[in-house]
Amino acid sequence: MESLRTRLWRHVFNRFPAYRGTGARVRYIAEDWSRVQVVIPRNWRTRNLVGTTFGGSIYGAVDPIYMVMLKRRLGSAFTVWDKSAEIEFRKPGESTLYADFRLTTSEIREIRTSLDRGESMDRVYEVEVVDEDGVVHATCEKTLYVRRDS
């Protein structure tokens, strides 16, 4: 369920110039940041020269999400940075596209218990960008650097 706080975060996210420029919108943030849903409408802002969804809009829509989710779930005792990304475009986007990001409680627990102060690790997350029928149009793999600061 979305809380008042995450609803406000959603509005801030959608108005942040770098994210707004992708043409995508965050449409849901779970109260505990365990789930975020993103929509990428196919419109004049996201369409490329051949009429399909611009790959940059797809990647830009998914780029910051796992980093922000992990940072919000772990808190100020951890540093979280994007380290690398890989995206595979499978099918041209000819309609509105969606991405559903999830971080489980067990994932967060594992990170907390496996890192001592000053230690770091890399975590790999994957998200699929799909249409309303669930057809996969792109897959993005993000590698995040995580360090316990205190």
Image: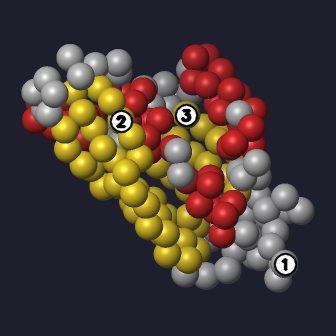
Contact check, label 1 and label 2, Cβ < 8 Å: no
**Mark 3 to mark 2: distance in Å?**
19 Å
71 relative to 49 in the view: left or right: left
- The image shows residue 7 at horizontal and vertical percentages of 64, 24
Total labels: the figure holds: 3
> CA–CA distance between discs 3 and 1?
32 Å
Can you say whether 46 is above or below 51 in the image? above
Q: What residue would you read off at disc 3?
A: 29
**Residue 141: in sight, yes or no?**
yes
- Which sits earlier in the primary sequence, circle 3 or circle 2? 3
Secondary structure of the residue carrying numbered label 3: strand
Q: How crowded is mark 2: few (under 14 residues within 10 Å), some or many (20 or more)?
A: many
Under mark 3, the amino acid is Ile
Residue 49's label in the rendered image is 1
Identity of the residue drawn at 73% across and 63% down: 96
Q: Locate residue 69: give its quadrant.
A: top left
Give the residue drawn at x 39%, y 30%: 71
Q: Nearest the camera: 54 or 135?
A: 54
